[in-house]
Image (cartoon, rainbow, N blue to C red):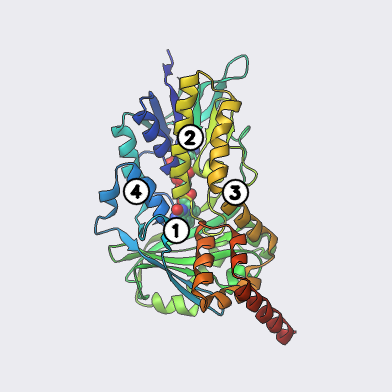
Amino acid sequence: MAERYDLVVVGAGPGGSSAAYHSAKAGLNTLLIDRQEFPRDKTCGDGLMPHAASEVALMGLADWLDEPHHGKFTGFSIYTRTAYLRQGVPPTLHGPTGYVVKRQETDARLLERATSAGAHLRAGVRATDLVRSASGRVAGIEATKAGESLRFETPIVVVADGVGGFAGKGMKAHQNAVARRQYFRDVAGPDKRDLHVFITEDMNSHGAGYGWVFYLGDGRANVGAGVSTASLARTGRNLKDFYDRFLEEPQLAAWLENATPEGPPTSWSLKMGMWGAKRYGQGLMAVGDAGSMIHPVSGEGVGYALESGRLAASWVHEAHVRHDFSASVLSGYERQLKHRRAREHLSGYALVNLVPNMVLLDPIFKACEKDPEARRTLLEVFTGDSPVYSLLKHPTTLAKALRDGVTERLNRA
Ligand SMILES: Cc1cc2nc3c(=O)[nH]c(=O)nc-3n(C[C@H](O)[C@H](O)[C@H](O)COP(=O)(O)OP(=O)(O)OC[C@H]3O[C@@H](n4cnc5c(N)ncnc54)[C@H](O)[C@@H]3O)c2cc1C
């Protein structure tokens, strides 16, 4: 006989563990499955923005975050073709500190919180299909483990399978960026309490992308680069080529001169910007990357996965209280998500898709360098804490950027 649960969560990354933790804590009989065994790694920059850290703290892990081997950051250093912007973490970012923690450890901790709260974990189990009743309602999932077929009954499924696409037929979201990272020991860059972000000409001449150096607290750094899939299509180049060129940028090459790589670089894809994804349906909600919740400018997704998992859990609870798993009830999840995040995500999505190349924006970075208020807003746009159009609050700086941009174009012509 098939096992029956109040809720099945597919995928035990941050989004799935958050949904399972908050559901189990609310007393729901929760099953969490993942196709992998834990601890497992996930290719990532390992950065936990302050808002992600506050979600982690909500899951009872505030003390764990402060362990000495975790990187802690209190500022950002952004390098572009012509500008250098240094900015402390703005107070609008839910606290003064962010963290850099290997995902292998973060995800294992979050998962442990979900199971401590009472969620049942089945690792090594791959969800293969949704089961629907004759009337089309979600009735459970089919799965496999080492060749054995399994079936779990439930009136509601939270899809948290990252870019996996398990519920693809009804809940489509497209991958629109790719990124690659590698660990290095003894990177010689300055100020290890900053996140270092490089908006290079190479990655931004035909689209959008950036490279990064994020320091862990144990002498290692996560060094990576991500570009939009549009950049790949426009240039005919692959991600490895962009990444290798990033390592050769003179500034980074100097930082890496005496650094030792640890393990090979690995790559993964990203679904960004909320745009075009269906995040709910009868008996279904998608959270985290499965719901395209990565911010399209920063590429940050862990905090949004945790937040959307928590919100989805509250709607699972609501649906059980009402005995109603209809799309109309679960649309409340979408409304709440959009209310919290759509302005920042959708305006960021428009920016990276409508501006043909980010090099055109270089005069804005340069003009913001000397204007602390504008610099702070620009950083909030980057981190997803302000919509792109909030830069209009700084007309003098924008006018200067426009003037400088036009002058430079005329000089180049
Ligand atoms: C190179 C790179 C750098 C990044 N850097 C950052 C960063 O610094 N900070 C940040 O916040 N974000 C970053 N991101 C984004 C971040 O990694 C994701 O947003 C985050 O992992 C999303 O979490 P999730 O729970 O939605 O999905 P995931 O973490 O991808 O978890 C999905 C889980 O689902 C499981 N699964 C998949 N299919 C199935 C199936 N059919 N059945 C069962 N289980 C299944 C997988 O095994 C996996 O464990 C980066 C991404 C990349 C690629």
Mark closest to the chain's N terminus, 4 or 3:
4
Mark earlier in primary sequence (1, 2): 1
**Disc 2 element:** helix
Q: Which numbered disc, 2 or 3, marks the residue that appears first in the sequence? A: 3
In the picture, measured across the screen, residue 29 lies left or right of residue 224, that is: left
Instruction: Say if mark 2 contacts mark 4, CB within 8 Å.
Output: no
Give the quadrant of residue 236. Answer: bottom right
Using the rendered view, name the quadrant where residue 145 is placed: top left
Q: Position of residue 182 (x, y in %)?
A: 42, 61
Q: Please, what is the three-letter code of the amino acid marked with disc 3?
A: Gln
Give the residue number, with chain letter if any, for mark 1: 92
Instruction: Name the foreground residue: 232 vs 115.
Output: 115
The image's mark for residue 295 is none
Q: Which residue is mark 2?
A: 312
Callouts 4 and 3 close, C-beta under 8 Å? no
Task: State the quadrant of the C terminus.
Answer: bottom right
Measured in 3D between alpha carbons, the distance from the residue under mark 3 to the one under mark 1, in whole angstroms, is: 29 Å
Residue behind mark 4:
106
| Ligand 1 is within 8 Å of the C-beta of the residue at disc 4 | no
The kind of secondary structure element at disc 4 is: helix
| Residue 68 at x, y percent in the picture | 24, 59
- How far across and how far down the image is residue 59, in percent? 33, 41
Q: Nearer the viewer, mark 1 or mark 2?
A: 1
> Of circles 3 and 1, which is in front?
1
Residue 242 vs residue 89, the one in the foreground: 89
